[in-house]
Image: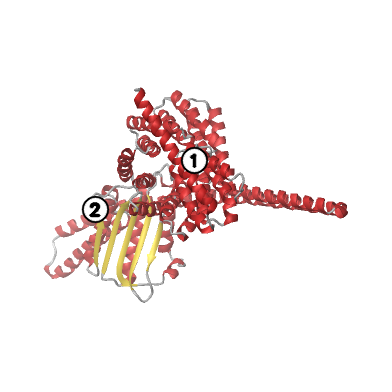
Amino acid sequence: MKRCLFLLVLVFVAQYAMAQSRIDSLLTAYGEANASEKNSITKDISRDLAKLDPEQVKNYGETIIAKNKQSEDKELAALSNEAYAIYYFRKGEFNEALPYNTKSLDLFTQTNNRYGLALANNSMGNILHAQSDFQAAVKYHLNSLKIREELKDEKGMGASYNNIANAYRALMQPKKALEYHKLSLAIKEKQNDTKAIALALSNVANTYWQLGDTQNALKISKQALVIQHKLNDVKMLGTTYNSLGFMSIRMGKFDAAMQYLKESLKYRLQLGDKSDLATVYFNFGNLYSQKEDFANAKKYLGMSMDLAKEGGDKGLILDLNKILAHIAEQEKDFKTSIDLLENASKYQDSIFKLEGQRALAEMQTKYETEKKEAAIKLLEKDNELKDARNKQQLYIACGVIILLLVVGIFLYSILKAQQQKRLANERLEVEKQRLNTVIQTQEEERKRISAELHDGIGPILSAVKINLSMLDHNPENAERYATAMSLIDRSYNELRQISHTMMPAMLAKTGLSQTLQEMVFNLNKAGKSEFNFYGDDEPERFSEQVEVNAYRIAQELLNNIMKYAKATEVTVQLHKENDELSLMIEDDGEGFDVNELYQSKGNGWANMQSRLNLLEGNIEIDSKLGKKGTVVHVIVPLKTTAENPALQTA
């Protein structure tokens, strides 16, 4: 046992000595290099910083400082600051990392070291992302990507694509995120970088989860897990197990979630990254909350809150306040619940107002700098001290007044805009409710009239026909008798068609897909055009509002084709795609001016727009005047009634 321990220590010392030797050799070469060579060595150092553990990164920074004591080289100073920024970032202490990275970025900008600028911009994006300032994070990652493209640094480009994707995912833009993740994965596969491939797969899996594709999310996460186990990648094993735990909680698989989170915690405790530990503790708290074990839930959520506050992770603090508020509500502690929700609201505002705060901070810094420069000039001009000081104080007073006015106007405009937005949303909601009531009333009236026609006049016509057929009739009046019977048949058929058009009974019984298929079948019998229908193999049922309004929209579109298009072939497609209902109608008839339709005040177009607004759907029309063929694509989001009260069944 002692021998094994001795060998482990020996291996560690040897690795440390090799790392130290490489640091020394790179820094020696750096001191003797020209500007172009320094760029290249900076690239090598940045690669080292990405691979080393936090303590080795810190040692890198200390070594650079020691080497730079005599020369005071700006680029070496930038590298040492960058090393400390990465060290604190890896430890999850983002507030500590930020000033070091800001200094590094400033120094690299002064020396125009391209690899250094790419590294510092990338690190700044990572720190801001960790602090939930996702829009600013995208800005810095794009800066880094632009430089890396200029340098043709494919490995760096892959990292930038990955970081941009993560920021878009945090901004709830998963489709955009998936584009960048796939670009990152393609580069890593081209370079056959197994560790980076596993990281990219984990991120792609998380993006599929955000898109609602559970099957792909779980499948790809487990692919990444196999690679990470082979590489013994402790950090990413902790991350992937944590993601699987989160997914299992959302799917209600609590036993599986517990096992995944225990595995994640095991790996994350090895590294001691406070940010990573905060997220796994959060998921433990979430799991216990779902199981209504509130004592354990509060224990883990409290541990997560301490680490999140230490690291300055506003997004996580926001989520923690929300879940703790929910627990307090379940425990009937309504005062605590309200207080926590108010805290959550403050953090929500903080996350979305970071840009405005940063602009004010920059203005303040600029003001302070100008003030110091003015003071230095005053000291240098003893003969003009009195007059210059009075002028300076006047300028400062004016500047402060102007600044306060600008800030006041700015804050007032924000508050006013928020109030106007809230009022507009309220008006829109009232309008939606009114529209829903009108349409529901129309549909109920259609149902009533349809039922009266079918159950009232229909049987009467049938009775008339039966009684007429039983009457003796004179052979001389045979032609008139046949005409009367034919007119009764036509009236009965017209009555059935009107009743079906107003409210097809099939819609309530079998659903939208079968009803549209029957409509297409009946239109085919007319013989004027060939109609085709394509739907899902196993069509689903939707809410009554979705089915009725989608049917009316399809009915209006097909009626317009019959009236105006002169089409020979019409195709109707109805599919459910993810959480959307897709209705596409194509014809080979005469095209028309789409802009003219958009400006139309006709009842048909207005009714379609009203129904689409109620369903929060949209319509896309591809047609040109003088050309054959028109495609109309209607997309309706399939929201739950809880998400959209306007869609609740009356």
Residue 256, position as x, y percentages in the image: 32, 32
Of circles 1 and 2, which is in front? 1
**Helix, strand or loop under label 2:** helix
Amino acid residing under circle 1? Val
Residue 150, position as x, y percentages in the image: 47, 61
**In the picture provided, is 167 more to the left or to the right than 206?**
right
From the viewer's perspective, is residue 438 above or below residue 69? below
- The earlier-in-sequence mark between 1 and 2 is 1
Q: Residue furthest bottom?
A: 626
Numbered circle sitting on residue 489? none
Mark 2, residue position: 459
From the viewer's perspective, is residue 305 above or below residue 194? above
Figure quadrant of residue 567: bottom left
**In the picture provided, is 46 more to the left or to the right than 229?**
right
Nearer to the camera, 325 or 148: 148
Numbered circle sitting on residue 57? 1
Residue 378, position as x, y percentages in the image: 81, 52
Residue 390, position as x, y percentages in the image: 85, 52
